[in-house]
Image: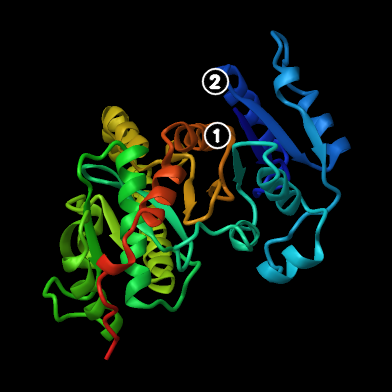
């Protein structure tokens, strides 16, 4: 398969995207990674790596002269920068010149480019997902920023698509779906959340476990947590901030004196395991669900290992037929059997 990778996306691009592509090409001999970006810059970065053993042939470069900057408006940038690495890469994907697209760049622009004209028939809104490190293993949260305002029916579709991804890619058996709210009771939450709760209880094929509060998300009692994009993004950023702060506090305290340093030395193996469990780099990235291609958005701070893992996620998403399963779900849905919409009161 071919994975199209945005070589200009990320905080230190093209360094980490190119290095990650090289690592992925070594680890997955069945994958060709097409690097899209400013050709001279990308090739100069590639030249820093050992490409022996046929790697060079599986790391072709496609020229894209423009780069979408993080402060640009997503939709406007996609329309005005037709020769950007994101727009060129998504265009190649649509033309069948690859099976997946990966970017650590402007997530909003990647989502906009993927969504414009590329939604699966029957999907009302595509959703941006992310993988969280919970106590019981990885869980999926969606939406995390694409749809700040939603209808109850959108949340049901997020649950359906998230359930398929969790089952196929995260290997969750009969994934349990939770609806993010400010209380476990079904009458808690906004009118939209209340209406969505009623719909989710009635929707066949969903293992709906009820509402989940923000402080319980990382307990791992739910495999998929569904939310509107505004609330989901706030939860995502707040969780990242707390995790970063706690790690910094622990480091400061354990290096504040000789006794603490001695204790820290003995606890290093345990701290290493904690860091590994919380390391977002190993998750690689998460999909845009609801578009008719495999599109993986990953963190801008990803280093080489993280980008390699993003290619792994793209490979697994494609090979497990996740997009096809979502397509089939909505294509095979009997309109007469659909639950009647519940209006938010």
**Is residue 93 found left or right of 264 in the rendered image?**
right
Residue at the location (72% across, 44% down)? 92
Depth check: 121 or 55 in front?
121
Which residue is drawn at the image coordinates 85% and 37% (left, top)?
39
Density class for disc 2 (Cα within 10 Å; few <14, some 14-19, many ≥20) is some
Q: Is residue 194 visible?
A: yes
Residue 192 percent location from the top left of the image: 30, 81
- Observer able to see residue 227: no
Question: Residue 31, percent across and down?
Answer: 60, 24
Q: Quadrant of residue 77?
A: bottom right
| Sequence-first tag of 2 and 1 | 2
Going by the image, does 181 lie left or right of 133? left
Residue at 35% across / 53% down in the picture?
A: 162
Q: Can you name the residue that lies furthest to the bottom here?
A: 345
Q: Residue at x 73, y 54 (%)?
A: 87
**Residue 235 against residue 59 in the figure, above or below:** below
**Residue nearest the observer in this picture, 91 or 303:** 91
- Give yes or no for contact between labels 2 and 1 (Cβ–Cβ under 8 Å): yes
Residue 225 in the image: state x and y as whole percent.
29, 59
Q: Residue furthest left?
A: 185
Q: Which residue is mark 2?
A: 28
Write down the residue under mark 1. Answer: 311
Q: Quadrant of the C terminus?
A: bottom left
């Amino acid at each position: 398969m071919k994975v199209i990778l945005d070589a200009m996306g990320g905080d230190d691009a093209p360094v980490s995207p190119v290095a990650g592509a090289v690592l992925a090409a070594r680890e997955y001999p069945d994958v060709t990674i097409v690097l899209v970006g400013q050709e001279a810059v990308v090739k100069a970065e590639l030249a820093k790596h050992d490409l022996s053993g046929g790697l060079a042939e599986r790391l072709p470069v496609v020229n894209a002269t423009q780069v979408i900057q993080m402060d640009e408006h997503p939709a406007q940038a996609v329309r005005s920068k037709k020769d950007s690495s994101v727009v060129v890469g998504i265009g190649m994907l649509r033309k069948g010149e690859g099976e997946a697209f990966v970017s650590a760049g402007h997530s909003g622009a990647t989502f906009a480019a993927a969504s414009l004209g590329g939604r699966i028939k029957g999907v009302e809104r595509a959703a941006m997902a992310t993988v969280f490190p919970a106590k019981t293993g990885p869980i999926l949260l969606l939406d995390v920023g694409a749809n700040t305002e939603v209808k109850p029916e959108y949340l049901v579709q997020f649950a359906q698509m998230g359930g398929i991804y969790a089952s196929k890619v995260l290997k969750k058996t009969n994934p349990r779906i939770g609806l993010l709210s400010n209380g476990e009771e079904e009458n808690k939450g906004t009118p939209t959340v209340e209406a969505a709760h009623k719909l989710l209880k009635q929707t066949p094929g969903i293992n709906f476990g009820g509402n989940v509060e923000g402080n319980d998300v990382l307990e791992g009692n739910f495999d998929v947590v569904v939310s509107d994009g505004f609330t989901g993004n706030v939860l995502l950023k707040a969780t990242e901030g707390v995790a970063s702060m706690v790690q910094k506090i622990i480091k400061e305290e354990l290096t504040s004196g000789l006794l603490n340093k001695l204790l820290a030395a003995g606890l290093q193996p345990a701290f290493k395991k904690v860091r590994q469990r919380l390391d977002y780099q190993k998750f690689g990235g998460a999909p845009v669900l609801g578009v008719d291609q495999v599109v993986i958005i990953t963190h801008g701070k990803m280093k080489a290992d993280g980008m390699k893992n993003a290619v792994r996620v793209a490979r697994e998403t494609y090979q497990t037929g996740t997009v096809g399963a979502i397509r089939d779900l909505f294509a095979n849905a009997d309109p007469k059997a659909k639950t009647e919409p519940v209006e938010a009161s």
